[in-house]
């Protein structure tokens, strides 16, 4: 069968001429506009688990990519790639992925993410990705907060010592990731970093039972609209769904009192006490996927 690049088929001749090399500070200084489509840094910007490369064709950079581990998780590398828009659908994305895969210092898989209808996700599935997590539509109107009931065990996070709030926050983060993306030993420091500024302690809410925080709705105010994350602090909290409901109602009431029309939820379909409450709020927006990309693509 005859194939041409214009038909969106891999261009073996072109790929054979491409040379890969580390991405440098000079590449960033001379960045073509399309570099801005992803976040690029120089090779080994943090350590041996943070790699970056460019693909060069006839002296011209035609693609770039990064591979890095999260400081909060140990299980996968994140990967991101950008190809010169004039040279897409010729196999450069796939070739860069293979190059980055070979740069891995550890034999762990790769992952990426995007909205279901984005080309980045189409590309990931084309190279064999599988879904590891789903984030539902995330825009929630505070006007719909009556769908959730208040709960007498819920207090503003400001009513508790901050150290207790931080501990609840880390506990929540740890178990909601346990089954699909386990945390690293030092994760708490990473996920709690900056919360003294970023956590809205009046809008954030904690359910306290027998003197212990058992559920949390964290409202992060460093973005607009604010982001809300909520769950129990352990997987097995009695009445967890109801307690998370009360925490969310507090957060939405507080935001509505301040005149905020919308918040953005952040969480996963696998968060058992959050998801039913999220659904009751009739969120709008796009579905978002986290996908694992096989190393042998
Ligand atoms: C995603 C991206 C890197 C793909 O680069 P590319 O060089 O076009 O990728 P390839 O030619 O290797 O494509 C491999 C396969 O992915 C799929 N694919 C790539 N782009 C696609 C698109 N826009 N829509 C649907 N499928 C697409 C196709 O199945 C393609 O094979 P085909 O051309 O034989 O049909 C490129 O579109 C890009 O730079 N996008 C902007 C940045 C970005 O979203 N990066 C995320 C990468 S994880």
Image: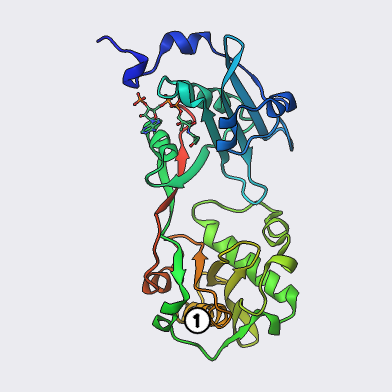
Front residue of 126/57: it is 57
Residue underneath mark 1:
249
Residue 108 image point, x, y percent? 56, 37
Disc 1: residue Cβ within 8 A of ligand 1's nearest atom: no
Front residue of 55/105: it is 55
Taking the image in four quarters, ligand 1 sits in the one at top left
Mark 1 burial class by Cα count in 10 Å: few <14, some 14-19, many 20+: many
User: In the figure, is residue 162 to the left or right of 119?
Assistant: right
User: In the figure, is residue 192 to the left or right of 288?
Assistant: right
Residue 188 image point, x, y percent? 69, 60
Residue at position x 49%, y 70% from top?
262
In the depicted structure, whether residue 98 falls above or below residue 135: above
For the C terminus, give its image quadrant: top left
User: In the figure, is residue 190 to the left or right of 119?
Assistant: right
Residue at position x 71%, y 54% from top?
186
Secondary structure under the numbered disc 1 in the rendered image: helix
Q: Which residue extends farthest left?
A: 1
């Amino acid at each position: 069968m005859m194939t041409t690049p214009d038909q969106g088929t891999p261009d073996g001749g072109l790929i054979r001429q491409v040379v890969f090399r580390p991405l440098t500070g000079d590449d960033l200084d001379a960045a073509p506009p399309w570099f801005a489509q992803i976040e690029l840094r120089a090779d080994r910007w943090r350590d041996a688990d943070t790699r970056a490369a460019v693909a060069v064709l006839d002296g011209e950079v035609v693609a770039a990519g990064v591979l890095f581990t999260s400081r909060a998780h140990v299980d996968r590398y994140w990967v991101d790639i950008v190809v010169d828009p004039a040279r897409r659908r010729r196999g450069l994305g796939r070739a860069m992925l293979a190059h980055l895969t070979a740069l891995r210092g550890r034999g762990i898989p790769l992952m990426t993410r995007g909205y279901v209808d984005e080309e980045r996700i189409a590309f990931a599935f084309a190279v064999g990705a599988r879904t590891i997590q789903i984030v539902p539509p995330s825009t929630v109107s505070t006007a719909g907060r009556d769908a959730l009931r208040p709960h007498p065990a819920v207090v503003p996070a400001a009513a508790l010592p901050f150290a207790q709030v931080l501990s609840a926050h880390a506990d929540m983060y740890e178990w909601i990731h346990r089954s699909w993306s386990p945390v690293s030993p030092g994760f708490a420091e990473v996920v709690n970093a900056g919360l003294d500024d970023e956590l809205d302690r009046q809008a954030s809410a904690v359910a306290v039972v027998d003197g212990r925080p058992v559920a949390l709705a964290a409202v992060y105010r460093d973005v607009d609209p604010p982001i809300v994350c909520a769950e129990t602090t352990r997987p097995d909290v009695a009445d967890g769904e109801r307690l998370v409901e009360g925490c969310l109602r507090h957060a939405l009431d507080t935001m509505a009192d301040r005149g905020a029309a919308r918040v953005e939820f952040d969480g996963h379909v696998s968060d058992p006490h959050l998801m039913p409450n999220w659904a009751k709020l009739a969120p709008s927006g796009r579905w978002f996927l986290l996908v694992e990309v096989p190393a042998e693509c």
